[in-house]
Image (cartoon, grey):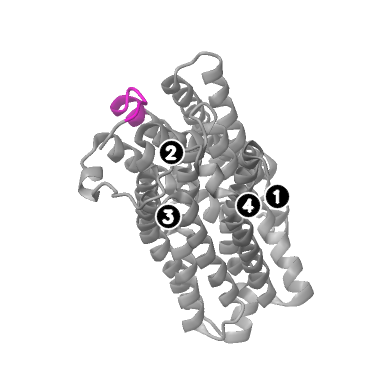
Amino acid sequence: MKIRSTYPVILGFLFVATGLSFLDRQVLPVTIIKIQEDFHITDIQYGIINTSFLISYAIMFTVSGRIMDMIGGRKGLAVSLGIWSLASCLHGTMSGFIQLLSYRFLLGAGEGGCFPGAAKIVHDYFDKSKRAFANGIAIGGSALGAVAAPPLVIWVSNQYGWRWSFLVPGIIGILWLAGWLSLPWKRIETRHTEEKAVREVIPLLKIITNKAAVIFILMRFLLDPVMYFIMSWVPKFLHETRGTSFDEIGRLFWIPFLGLGIANIAGGWCSDLLIKKGFSLNASRKWMMGIAAAITVVAPFIAWATSVYLIIALVTLLLVAHGFWITNYITAISDVFGKDTASIVGLSGTAGAVAGMIANPLIGYWVQAYSYTSLWVITGAMYPLAFILFARFIPDIKPVRI
């Protein structure tokens, strides 16, 4: 295999890896009804199971990011994907609450390394003029994994039983690992700067006292609850406020995630195109993120829209904006922090997961006590607020050494 032809292959592997990470985590929400029938797992126990995933996922986002910066994204992502593929297969062998709780925790531990690893690999193997597009492709797999999961899981469960819904993606992950390890890495790495030896990572104290790092982490803390709100509460919002049937939600709710996946790639491509047209790196990233932030102000209209199709269209527009935002956000981290990219992406991911754990019960309380309207208003304000913080405190995207 020629070295030059290997780079699209690397991107293809990253696309599949992030797709698998979202596919694997969505098998349980689809199959839980059958699992509850077989093992009498209560709703309270199911909530605890979901929390166990979020806890390990939040912790390992930071831990994995720092490991990636020490040993490199190639090895780190291989270990992470191997762990979560094993965990997925173990789900298919579970026989009760304790086992499912343990396997879910293991799944979160493995998947915590997915995005720090992907960001690290893109930084190490792709030039900065192509980095945003590469990040878009890598991240885009997650959205398409979310699109594919429900119909695939339902089909496999109906044909072969719910256990195979966990075993199949786990086996695919193991095959991915074999292919990843078989790539000609020694020849590839002679052309790049990825350090083969274990390198010392920057202390956490230095990261959390660096202004640029704090702003990137704060932006993720502010915005991840918005994504958790959209992913977890929009179906409930449609059913409770517009009387939308569950079948119709299933027919429509994949559309926003398809838009997200396309926008991940398009956002990176547009940013790199601006650089090729003569825009500075700072301007190209911020133009994309600023436009995305401006688009999200349509969110309050969702609260007042009466047509389900209009609501789906507006939610799709929101996720398209997020796709443009997140690709350039992660690329900007790479532009600023270079070799320490995975550590910053990891810490920001942990901040986002913690914010999500805090926000979800608060959203539930607010919906029960008040309404969804103010939540949509807040959604429309968060991206512009994050962009203002970004522009104010990181006026120029340029390399920084902590």
- Position of residue 14 measured from the top left corner of the image (x, y, whole percent): 58, 48
Q: CA distance from mark 3 to mark 1?
A: 23 Å
Dot 2 corresponds to which residue? 193
Dot 4 corresponds to which residue? 16
Q: Quadrant of the N terminus?
A: top right
**Which is in the foreground here, disc 4 or disc 3?**
4
Dot 3 corresponds to which residue? 363
**Which is in the foreground here, disc 4 or disc 2?**
2
User: Residues in magenta?
Assistant: 388-399
Q: Residue at x 53, y 82 (%)?
A: 41
Q: CA distance from mark 4 to mark 3?
A: 32 Å
- Position of residue 375 measured from the top left corner of the image (x, y, whole percent): 45, 45
Q: CA distance from mark 1 to mark 4?
A: 24 Å
- Position of residue 192 measured from the top left corner of the image (x, y, whole percent): 48, 38
Q: Residues within 10 Å of mark 1 (few under 14, many from 20)?
A: some
Q: Residue at x 53, y 61 (%)?
A: 81
Q: Is residue 309 left or right of residue 29?
A: right
Q: Are marks 2 and 3 in contact (CB under 8 Å)?
A: no
Picture layout, residue 306 above or below residue 360: above
- Secondary structure of residue under mark 2: loop
Q: Quadrant of residue 244?
A: bottom right
Among the two numbered marks 3 and 1 on one chain, the one whose residue lies closer to the N terminus: 1
Q: Nearer the viewer, residue 181 or 261?
A: 181
The stretch drawn in magenta includes residue 18: no
Q: Residue at x 45, y 56 (%)?
A: 76
Q: Residues within 10 Å of mark 4 (few under 14, many from 20)?
A: many
